[in-house]
Amino acid sequence: MTRSKGNEFTVELPNRRIKPVDGMAVTAQVWEEAHDHHWLHQRFHDRSLHGPGIVVGLEVVASDPADASVYVLPGVAVDPQGRLILVPEPVAFDFGSAHGALRLLLTYDESRPAPEVEREDGALYVRAQFGIEVATAGDLSPGPSPARGGEQTPPSLAGKGAGGLGFSPSLAGKGGWGDRSHGVELARVWRRDREAAVRDAVDAEYPGQNAIDLRFRRTIGAVLQPAASLAVFYTGGRKETARDEAHGADHLARWLRANGRQAWVDDDVALRTGLDGADLLYIVGHDAFQLDRDEMGALYAYLQAGGTIFFESCRCDAQGGGPDMPADASFLDLLASMGIHLQELAGDHPLLNEPNLFAAPPPAFEAGEAPRVLAAEGVVYASGDYGCLWQGRRRGKVATREEIRSAAEWGANLVAYALGRARLRQRDGG
């Protein structure tokens, strides 16, 4: 064995491997050495090239209704020693009376060697297991440190590892927030007192007291961005010009792809059959319109399934522009019949903040007129015609690069908002 040193860790790494030959005796020692060679190299690879952290899953969510317990969802992690931790099914964890600044940790464990079948000559198996425990943050507590005060009792682990041998966590300071040598951090909670219910954070960036804080989780798995699917539906007449360009949606998709987000457009879809798999439905208005019952049912089902609708009228053919377009009135009447009430965008709305920051919606096709953008859950309405600007058009003037870029960045926020809704729906089992 040679001892290989990294910046923060030491791993026993074998510098030899067994060469099999015919007739050699495969003893238990030989078998174990052969397997350890691969296992130790895999651990070294995971620890040194990826580091400890969460590969996939392992989200932490509050109980419903909220109480002292949380649920850790299935997933995979790598611990500080490069060992793979698998949580195959949701696990409930009860904080008990623990309070103050707390960290929820996932740790690795193994079972004792045991046979699958009670036979004298049967193989012995070592099963990988996991533990979940809570550690205090020591000196970060504004009052007496819970870790030093001795007031808390260890919470219990509700759930078991893969081998069916769960173990109770300990409540102790592990060197403060910076020490991650013990396990993989899943979440933090600043719990006000032992009676406080633990809740999901309303704002993930500012979770506050008694809320699950996921900001400091370390993700090491490959970040696989889902491809965004945009479907374009036209209402009314005069759509030949718009259809040639998918009313700017294809330009937006190209811009997204050039900036690392895969996005594709299905143009001129039918509401009854063309919405499956679409993250964003872009409805382009031409003249007044009225949907039939089947089309309205398809729209309602699409929203309930986590889809997002973006509506605006095409203004390039309208003489002189103006705030009122026939298709706008038809769309607002449609929403009213569905019980959907649009509101002005608040300053913290994702359409103005994620991933690009806007103080207000950027200019659109109509020159000299600030577009009005309204939204409800899953529905976005714009009065300015961003689609034409995505094609480089503005009324009465040539669109500048800055104007086109700002409109495309706002379109990126729109697509991100739609993907976020779809992701939440999938997580909640919709």
Image (cartoon, rainbow, N blue to C red):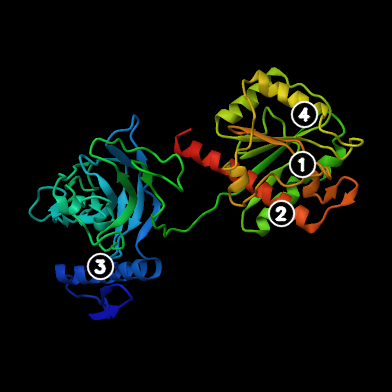
With 2 as the anchor, is 418 left or right in this view? right
Q: In the image, residue 148 lies at what x, y percent?
A: 16, 54
Observer-side mark, 3 or 4, equals: 4
Identify the residue under disc 1. Answer: 370
Label 2 neighbourhood size at 10 Å, few (<14), some (14-19), many (20+)?
some
Looking at numbered disc 4 in the image, what kind of residue is underneath it? Asp
Looking at numbered disc 1 in the image, what kind of residue is underneath it? Ala
Residue sitting at x 31%, y 39%: 70
Q: Secondary structure at mark 1?
A: loop
Observer-side mark, 4 or 2, equals: 4
Q: In the image, residue 315 lies at what x, y percent?
A: 84, 37
Quadrant of the drawing holding the N terminus:
bottom left
Label 1 neighbourhood size at 10 Å, few (<14), some (14-19), many (20+)?
some
Identify the residue under disc 3. Answer: 35
The disc, 1 or 2, on the residue closer to the chain's N-terminal end is 2
Identify the residue under disc 2. Answer: 254
Observer-side mark, 1 or 4, equals: 1
